[in-house]
Image (cartoon, grey):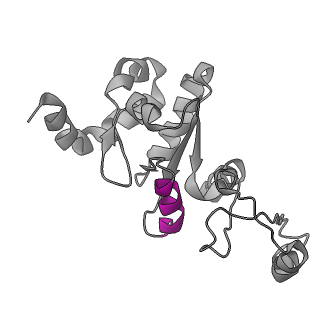
C-alpha cells in the first residue's frame, strides 16, 4: 500500500470535518484543496485535478450524482462518453461544490448534477416536436412554470429525459430548508 491508498482508506472518516472546515474558511480550503478526495460513481477516489484530467479537453463542467440508483440512466450515459461522475451522497458535498465554484472562479469550474444537463446528449436525429409537446402539455401549465423542450438524443434507447436546470434545482433545495 502506498501513502495515497492509506489516505484514501481513512478519508471517509475525515471527510465531514475537512468539508465543513473548507466550506467555512477559504484559507483552510486553500491549504487542503490538493488533498480533497472526491468519490466517483465507480468507486475511485480522485483529487479535483485528477478528475479534471479525465474530462474531455477544455471542459470545465464537473458532473455529479446525488443518488446512484435513481440517477443510474444518466450516470450510464456519461460513462458511455467516458466522463466520470462524482458521487455527492453526503450532506456537505453540494455545498462544498458551490464553494469550490466561488473559490476557483478564475478557473470557471461549474458543477452540474447529471440530470440537469441535456446538451451533452443531444443527437442529430429527427423528433416529432408537436407530438412530444402535446404528450407533456399537462405538466407545463402556468402555475407550475415548466418549460418543455424537445431534442433528439444520441441514445435512442432512452425514450425521454427529464431535466431541471442546476440553478433552479439549487434554489428549490434552499427554499425547502426554510
Q: How many marks?
A: 0
- The residue shown at (58%, 34%) is 59
Vertical placement of 23 versus 62: above or below? above
- SS assignment for the magenta stretch, majority: helix
Task: Specify the quadrant that holds the C terminus.
Answer: bottom right
Relative placement, left or right, of 29 versus 157 is left
Question: Where are the magenta residues, as a range?
Answer: 70-80
Q: Which residue sits at x=46%, y=55%?
A: 79
Q: Foreground: 57 or 160? A: 57
The x and y percentages for residue 63 are 53, 47
Is residue 172 in sight in this rendering?
A: no
- Where, quadrant-wise, is the N terminus in this rendering? top left
On the picture, is 148 further left or further right than 94? right
Question: Can residue 111 be seen?
Answer: yes
Q: Name, please, the residue furthest toward the left.
A: 1
- State yes or no: residue 165 in magenta: no
* Residue 151 placement, left or right of 9: right
Q: Residue furthest front?
A: 125
Q: Nearer the viewer, residue 134 or 122?
A: 122
Residue lying at 59% horizontally and 27% vertically, measured from the top left: 102
Q: Seen in the image, is 28 located left or right of residue 131? A: left
Q: Residue at x 35, y 23 (%)?
A: 34
Q: Check residue 74 for magenta coloring.
A: yes
Q: Position of residue 4 (x, y in %)?
A: 19, 31
Which sits in the foreground, 148 or 124? 124
Amino acid at each position: 500500500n502506498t501513502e495515497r491508498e492509506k489516505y484514501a482508506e481513512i478519508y471517509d472518516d475525515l471527510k465531514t470535518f475537512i468539508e465543513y472546515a473548507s466550506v467555512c474558511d477559504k484559507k483552510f480550503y486553500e491549504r487542503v484543496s490538493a488533498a480533497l478526495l472526491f468519490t466517483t460513481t465507480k468507486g475511485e477516489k480522485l483529487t479535483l485535478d485528477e478528475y479534471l484530467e479525465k474530462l474531455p479537453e477544455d471542459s470545465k463542467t464537473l458532473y455529479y450524482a446525488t443518488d446512484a440508483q435513481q440517477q443510474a440512466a444518466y450516470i450510464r450515459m456519461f460513462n458511455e462518453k467516458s466522463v466520470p461522475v462524482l458521487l455527492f451522497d453526503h450532506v456537505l458535498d453540494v455545498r462544498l461544490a458551490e464553494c469550490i465554484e466561488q473559490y476557483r472562479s478564475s478557473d470557471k469550474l461549474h458543477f452540474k448534477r447529471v440530470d440537469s444537463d441535456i446538451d451533452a446528449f443531444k443527437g442529430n436525429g429527427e423528433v416529432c416536436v408537436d407530438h412530444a409537446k402535446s404528450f407533456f402539455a399537462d405538466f407545463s401549465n402556468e402555475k407550475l412554470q415548466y418549460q418543455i423542450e424537445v431534442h433528439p438524443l444520441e441514445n435512442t434507447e432512452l425514450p425521454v429525459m427529464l431535466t431541471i436546470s442546476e440553478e433552479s434545482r439549487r434554489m428549490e433545495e434552499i427554499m425547502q430548508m426554510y
